[in-house]
Amino acid sequence: MKKTKLLCGLAVLFTVATQQVNAQSWNLNGNAGTAATNFIGTTDAKTLKIKTNNVTRMVVTSNGKIGIGNAGPVSRLDIIGSTTATDPVVSILGKYAGSADVIGLNVSSVTSDTGGIGLVANGNFIGVNGFGNGIGVEGDGNIGVLGFSSYAPGALVDPTGTWGQSIGGNIGNGVFGISQSATQNISIWGIATDTSTATSPVDFAGYFQGNVLAWRYYTPSDARLKSNVQPLGSVLSKLNKLETATYNFRTSEYPNLYLPSDLQTGFMAANLQEQFPNLVQDVTLPEKIHPKTGVLISQSASIKVVNYMGMIPVLTAAIQEQQAQIETKDATIETLKSQLTALESKVAAIEAALNNGSSAERLSNPTSATLEQNSPNPFNQSTTIKYFLPENSKNARLTVTSVTGVVVSDYVLKGKGNGQVTLNANEFAAGNYTYSLIIDGNVVSSKSLMLTK
């Protein structure tokens, strides 16, 4: 009897003990009947550890910080990768079969409109490496994407704040900027501290190896920004010494400068530098190598570059200088025209006296030689001089003499009666001339003409 009671007592004790253990455990195959107050963890100020293969893989500290591969996390989530594994420390893949945007990682920091950083990525080589079929990196905030690269003294590196590269597709955009609905919209803002000298500029806010398209282009020209302002003075003589030409770049010798291959028109830099040294600079184009692959992107070259925009005021000054010369010559021409008119009147009076009558009298007396006024007069291409030789004339000539008395042209006249001589402007220099009809060694008549060019 006592033995039966003992066995029953042991059975009851084992059942109670088993129930107490099950009540404080989680089954490996899942649990049912859980309550909102159930949890896995600690109720004291101890760290919860999770192990596999008897190695601690993750901890949750008493103050709620989670460490993966890190037994002493200092952030809400603190992950340290293996020192030997090359696979990503964190890999996130979001899948969705529809047309909505699936976000792989959403990082937000909300403190104020002017504070809070969504994501900070530091790498010895690359801070953020974004790749996507459509968009590599998209940032939203007061500053959408902030790229910062610090130069370590002594390190032979090319620090790059933001690197954009696009390959393939329809219209590739290495860097694309849009600014709208702001008080002042600036899509892309580039600043380079200007430490360049007059002989070797090295700083460029924008460096483009290819065509640049813009609707308008402005450059600062406010008088308040300038000092030592001096007029250009005479530039025509310098412009006459410039060499202009069409040419092709040696693209095969400089394949990584991305020079245009079509026919170009421009100046020869060395020749331009002789006349306008401030419009030509000697620069060294930097070499660019892909920081990851080591492939040469752009080769280095020491070349001369031309400030073509700077030639605009030079050409303007030349037009103004030339216009002043034209106006002076126009005034001189008007003066010469007045003098020519007066001379023509005098010559006409002399001719009338020599011929002793008008053309009608000449017709009634065909033994008299006559010389008519050239037409047109003044002329700039060609002019015609008409004359009449009587039957009794033996030797007849028409001479053209400069204002200094030098015979510049001498025509032998053949035949009798009416004739004419045509003078071409390309045979004479611009100016005033006297032409005379000489018969048998005697000057029969003289008149004046003017050639303008």
Image: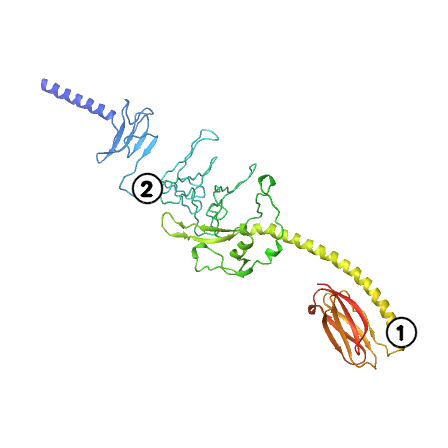
Along the line of sight, the residue nearer the viewer: 166 or 59? 166
The image shows residue 429, relative to residue 113, as above or below, that is below
Percent of width and height locating residue 228: 58, 42
Indicate which label's residue lies in the foreground, 1 or 2: 1
Circle 2 packing at 10 Å, graded few (<14), some (14-19), many (20+), is: few
The image shows residue 207, relative to residue 55, as above or below, that is below
Judging by the rendered image, the residue that carries numbered circle 2 is: 88
Along the line of sight, the residue nearer the viewer: 40 or 176? 176
Percent of width and height locating residue 69: 28, 35
Percent of width and height locating residue 383: 75, 69
Q: Amino acid at mark 1?
A: Ala
Please indicate whether residue 101 sits to the left or right of residue 58 in the image: right
Kindly report the distance in space between the C-alpha atoms of the residues bearing marks 1 and 2.
116 Å
Along the line of sight, the residue nearer the viewer: 406 or 260? 406
Percent of width and height locating residue 45: 28, 22
Looking at the rendered structure, the secondary structure element under dot 2 is loop
Q: Quadrant of residue 327?
A: bottom right
Which part of the image, by quadrant, shows the C terminus? bottom right
Q: At x 86% / y 67%, what residue is drawn?
A: 349
Q: Quadrant of residue 337?
A: bottom right
Judging by the rendered image, the residue that carries numbered circle 1 is: 360
Q: Quadrant of residue 245?
A: bottom right
Looking at the rendered structure, the secondary structure element under dot 1 is helix
Which part of the image, by quadrant, shows the N terminus? top left
Along the line of sight, the residue nearer the viewer: 18 or 380? 380
Task: Answer yes or no: is residue 335 visible.
Answer: yes
Please indicate whether residue 55 sits to the left or right of residue 180 in the image: left
Circle 1 packing at 10 Å, graded few (<14), some (14-19), many (20+), is: few
Q: Earlier in the sequence, mark 1 or mark 2?
A: 2
Q: At x 87% / y 70%, what residue is drawn?
A: 352
Residue found farthest to the top = 2
Q: Amino acid at mark 2?
A: Pro
